Amino acid sequence: MSDAVLHTLTGAYALHALPDSERREFERHLGHCAACSVEVLEFAETATRLGLAVSAAPPQELRERVLREIATVRQEPPATGRRPRTGVSGRGGAGRTRRWPTFALAASLAAAAGFGGVAVWQSQEARDARQEARATQERSEQLARVLAAPDAQSRSGKLADGATGTVVVSRSQDRAVFLASGLDEAPSGKVYQLWFDDRGTMRSAGLMRASGDGGLSTTYAALLDGPVDGATGMGVTVEPAGGSAHPTSAPVALMNLPA
């Protein structure tokens, strides 16, 4: 497939709409095309905004309204299929009939309280999703600014298992971006961690998350945390979930930063 055609697949890739063969070919192209990397991030950001635009959190007064209205609903006794006997007290049918509304009301109140808890949980989930989307948007915009900076310089190289990687640095913004294509997902319970090489001392630059469709061969586009400062290189290692203070494995990638 020609580069001219591959340039038109950014939107379909961002929406995970490409067949596997085209996705793999596009990911190889993405490893050395900064313009397409920016477009993919922008399309993904737009899709996130559209999804949030139609989400709605439950109203705050929902729980109070349910609890208020439950007291006005008459509780019906259970249908036993038998005519209740009159004049029976104690443990007989009449006693059970008199106690039933109390039991039903208690159960209804418990259900209403649980429903209110679900509503609060859903509202919190929606707020968390919006905050995460805003943070993702900010990182995407910063990543795009680095890639589009007039002084952006890049360096590419081969990684393990035939994967390719590109590091882009903007000295004016003092930030760096790492792009990888064809890199297998991290093993279960592990993550890829980024590092700045400060002349032999490795400084954590955050965790790297996949931006592909979750297949075996995935694309990564990561904004390294923190300034480039005096770093001369960068690396990627496989670390326990949550990351490590210092590298604990052999590097998957180790590249010099462009001068």
Image (spheres, rainbow, N blue to C red):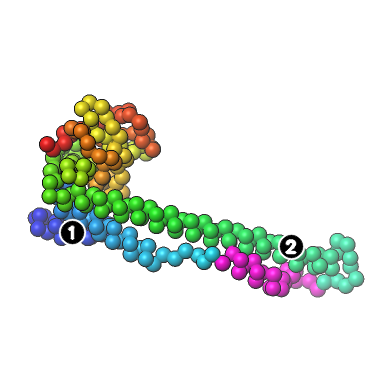
Q: Quadrant of residue 102?
A: bottom right
* Residue wearing tag 1: 9
Residue 62 on the magenta segment: yes
* Residue wearing tag 2: 103
Residue type pointed to by label 2: Phe
State whether residue 220 is above or below residue 202.
Answer: below
Most extreme residue toward the top, as rendered? Answer: 200
Residue span colored magenta: 61-83
State whether residue 255 is above or below residue 84.
Answer: above
- Name the element at disc 1: helix
User: What residue sits 44% from the left and 58% below the top?
Assistant: 126
Q: Which of marks 1 and 2 is nearer the N terminus?
A: 1
- Name the element at disc 2: helix
Residue 125 on the magenta segment: no
Q: On the rendered image, what quadrant is the N terminus found in?
A: bottom left
Most extreme residue toward the front, as rendered? Answer: 172
